[in-house]
Image (cartoon, rainbow, N blue to C red):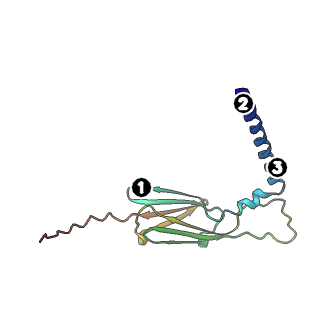
Amino acid sequence: MAGLILWKNQEINKIKRDIDRLFSRILDDFRFPSFMTGLRTAPLIDLEETKDSVIIRADIPGLNPDDIDISVTEDRLNIKGEIRREHTGQGINYFRTERQYGTFYREIQLPCRIRPDDVTATYKDGVLKIQLPKCSPEKPKTVRIKVR
C-alpha cells in the first residue's frame, strides 16, 4: 500500500510541474508579465520604527519629485502620484513594454501617533524616504476620586 501512495504522490507532483510549465509558457507568449506589472498601483514600502521616529521607504523609480503628493495625519500616511511615460515620437514600434506608468496611491496605517508638522521627505535614486517623528508619550492622567 505504501508503494501505491508514493507512486500517486509522484504522479501528482509531475502533473503540477507540467501545469506550472504550461501556464508559464502561456503567460510569456501573450506577454502577460508586462500586463501584470501594470496592475500594481501602489509602491512597495519598508516601514521601520526607531525610538524617536517612524521611517518609510518607498520604491518609486522614474518619478519627478514634483509629481509626488504626500499627506499625513497623526496616524495615517498617504502617498500618491503619477509616473509619466516619455513620448519618443512617431514611428516607434515597441517589441515589449514592462515598465510601469500611470497613477499610484498608497495609504499606510502608522504604528503610533506622529507629529505631522515635523515630517520630512527626500527622494533619491528612485527611493522616497519619509521621516515621521513620534509624538512624545502622554503621561497617564491620574484623577483622585472621593468616596462618600
Q: Check disc 2 and report the residue beneath it.
A: 6
First of labels 3, 1 by sequence position:
3
- Residue type at mark 1: give it: Thr
Q: Position of residue 109 (x, y in %)?
A: 49, 64
Instruction: State which quarter of the image contains the C terminus.
Output: bottom left
First of labels 1, 2 by sequence position:
2
Q: Check disc 1 and report the residue beneath it.
A: 50
Secondary structure at numbered mark 2: helix
Q: Position of residue 43 (x, y in %)?
A: 61, 62
Kindly report the distance in space between the C-alpha atoms of the residues bearing marks 1 and 2: 51 Å
Task: Give left or right: position of 142 versus 124.
Answer: left
Residue at 30% in and 65% down: 138
- Residue type at mark 3: give it: Arg
Quadrant in which residue 133 is drawn: bottom left
- Residue type at mark 2: give it: Leu
User: Which is nearer the eye, 36 or 129?
Assistant: 36
Q: Check disc 1: other Cα within 10 Å, few if <14, some if 14-19, many if 20+.
A: few
Q: Check disc 3 and report the residue beneath it.
A: 25
Q: Check disc 2: other Cα within 10 Å, few if <14, some if 14-19, many if 20+.
A: few
Residue extending furthest toward the right: 91
User: Which is nearer the eye, 89 or 139?
Assistant: 139
